[in-house]
Image (spheres, rainbow, N blue to C red):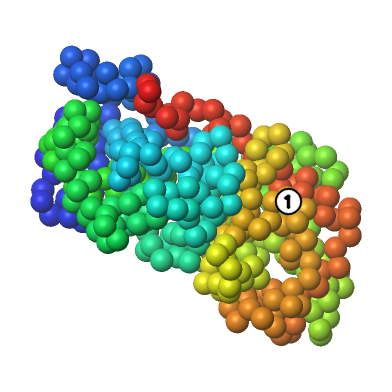
Amino acid sequence: MLKKISSLLIITLSFSCGSDNDSEYVPVETYPNVTAAFGDNINLSNLANYANQTVPAYITKNNTGSNLITDKGATLGRVLFYDKKLSSNNTISCASCHQQANGFSDIAISSQGVNGTTGRHSMRLINNRFANETKFFWDERAINLETQTTMPIKDHGEMGYSGTNGDEAFSGLITKLSAIGYYKELFKFVYGSEEITENKMQLALAQFIKSIQSFDSKYDAGRALAANEGQPFTNFTTQENQGKNLFLTPPVFDATGNRTSGGLGCAGCHAAPEFDIDPNSLSNGIGGSIAGGADFTNTRAPSLRDIAKPDGTPNGPMMHTGVITTLQAAIGHYGNLTTAAINNTNLDPRLKPNGFGQQLHLTAPEVNAVIAFLKTLSGTNVYTDSKWSNPFLN
């Protein structure tokens, strides 16, 4: 049964949109505008499974918070995510910068907005709910995902409802969406009322984004058969197991930051099996900005899962500047951070052992082994599953 929402719940982020029973029958004729806009891509009587997806037992983190994923809420979130009407000139959607085919990132260094390009590379969105870090954006300026979802919409450069520089305020977007037939129907379907608010949009968008998960990789197949991370995976090649060991094992340094033995210690910041960023991480040594000049404020990163496509090619450029375009270069960046330790005032202490920028003295076989391991973190379903695809007919 649809539930009424109190005004108190509407203005907080503690409400899970959608009903507990998302499988109730919905006559097509009740929602003609939804049918006209989405056809068979959205069936309100047979919703896609967002709320009860399988998660491996070894994944212990789940950042859904109080805004639990529901099939109804995530369905509305999918529409909002792909709708270009959320931008001031109807040309940019969330999906313009976060593309399913590219791991919900962008192959461009800077993504195109309504008034220019983004100041940082668009971060991958896969598996964001399975993380210790609950803040969003590279500089962690959004306290949670719900808050983050409408910040690009209210940005002058990105989607243009900033209320500054000649832009309409966000209230103008609410007015625009409230006049659209399929939103009248969808908001009533999810919330029991046609009323659109920013909070309702945030809840639905966050549910859709939280639902984007990838656990069908070669790594997952191996981890399911292993007693622990450190055990060799029976489905891995010798090189892949070597790369896993190098990734997981901390390095041993001498007094001046030279690695003398051990692994590369990648897991110190990107712990398995989620491979997301440690929330206490500081700068990784990339201290520049796309526009030029220094920027040491970037301390978040996406999960390393699906850093590459199933064929092994990267899902676009890496780091907040997009300055790194290959996995080899990404690993090589951490090989010698002596200059970064001098110039970067926010460099993570783990990257400057004994006060010196780390020098890993990487060998070609080590780099190739870690690359082989990183490629095992890529799934396949997240790139093709229709529930995360563009629902619009046109």
Q: Is residue 49 above or below residue 266?
A: above
In the image, is 239 to the left or to the right of 83?
right
Horizontal and vertical percent for residue 241? 80, 47
Give the SS element for disc 1.
Answer: helix
* Type of the residue with mark 1: Leu
Which residue is depicted at the point 64% across and 50% down? 317
Which residue is depicted at the point 84% across and 45% down? 239
Horizontal and vertical percent for residue 380? 61, 32
Q: In front: 88, or 7?
A: 88
Q: In front: 217, or 20?
A: 217
Q: Is residue 246 above or below residue 17?
A: below
- Seen as rendered, the residue at the extreme front is 166
Q: Quadrant of residue 381?
A: top right
Horizontal and vertical percent for residue 376? 70, 41
Q: Is residue 231 visible?
A: no
Horizontal and vertical percent for residue 3? 14, 37
Q: Which residue is mark 1?
A: 327
